[in-house]
Amino acid sequence: MSPAPAATPGPQAMYPNGLRIRKIRFGEYDIDTWYDAPFPEEYAAIPDGRLWMCEFCLKYMKSRFSASRHQLKCKVRCPPGDEIYRDGRISIYEVDGRKNKIYCQNLCLLSKMFLDHKSLFYDVEPFLFYVMTEMDDAGAHFVGYFSKEKLSPKNYNVSCIMTLPVRQRQGWGNLLIDFSYLLSKKEQRAGSPEKPLSALGALGYKNYWTLSIMRYLRTAPPNPSLEGTRSLCDTK
């Protein structure tokens, strides 16, 4: 009987935890990554498996030294798009993937580290990215984003949605989902997220619609019907 061929080392054998990049430094946060992202191979052996990212322009770097030098030179303090929403310190910027290709590609790489189904990395031109930020004296700090196709034959209003792990469970995801439906209403079209949803995405939408239906039932007339709930959808 011939010996079994040697197994090709997989990610678990090549890198601890199966990840080339195990942590990112993003602003004031050290964030553990969940999934591998297709960064250039030269980033496979960075010290401590930690990637440094500028929270404003999303440039990624190999070391604290490079990040410190970049911080001294970087003049960017908000996403490179049009601010289309503001409420107090919260803003949402619309960023065109064609006009701001590098920023959007870096945004996709960032999100891939926290989304298992993320597949868009470099072909960002057909997409718009809606980036939510929280403003303080230092600038507009990245919170999360969603993307959508400029021309979606199925009227999808979200292609990908992600909130930074350190910002999760604070209501930001619900706000992003709510804003996607507001855009659909403004465009006078029915909108829904692209299928299939990731596990976290499905959980987020379930939570969003549970809260929406509860708010509707709180002020609904007696014996509400399915037909009556159309007004709920009309507000989204």
Image: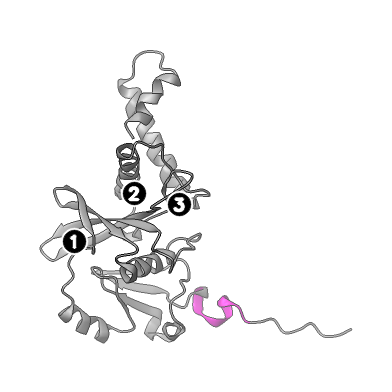
Q: Quadrant of the N terminus?
A: bottom right
Counting from the top left corner in percent of width and height, residue 175 is at 30, 45
Q: Mark 1 points at which residue?
A: 140
Element marked by disc 2 = helix
Give the Cα separation between the discs numbered 1 and 2. Answer: 18 Å
Q: Mark 2 points at which residue?
A: 173
- Split into 4 quadrants, where in the image is the C terminus? top left
Q: Is residue 14 covered in magenta? A: yes
Element type at marker 1?
A: strand
Q: Nearer the viewer, residue 236 or 124?
A: 124
Identify the amino acid type marked 2: Gly
SS for tag 3? Answer: helix
Give, as a single range, the part of the protein colored magenta: 9-17
Crowd band around label 3 with a 10 angstrom C-alpha radius: few (<14), some (14–19), many (20+):
some
Q: Earlier in the sequence, mark 1 or mark 2?
A: 1
Lateral position of residue 112 relative to residue 179, left or right: right
Q: What residue type is labelled 3?
A: Leu
In the picture, residue 132 is in which quadrant?
A: bottom left
Pair 1/3: label in front = 1
- Which residue is denoted by mark 3 in the rendering? 200
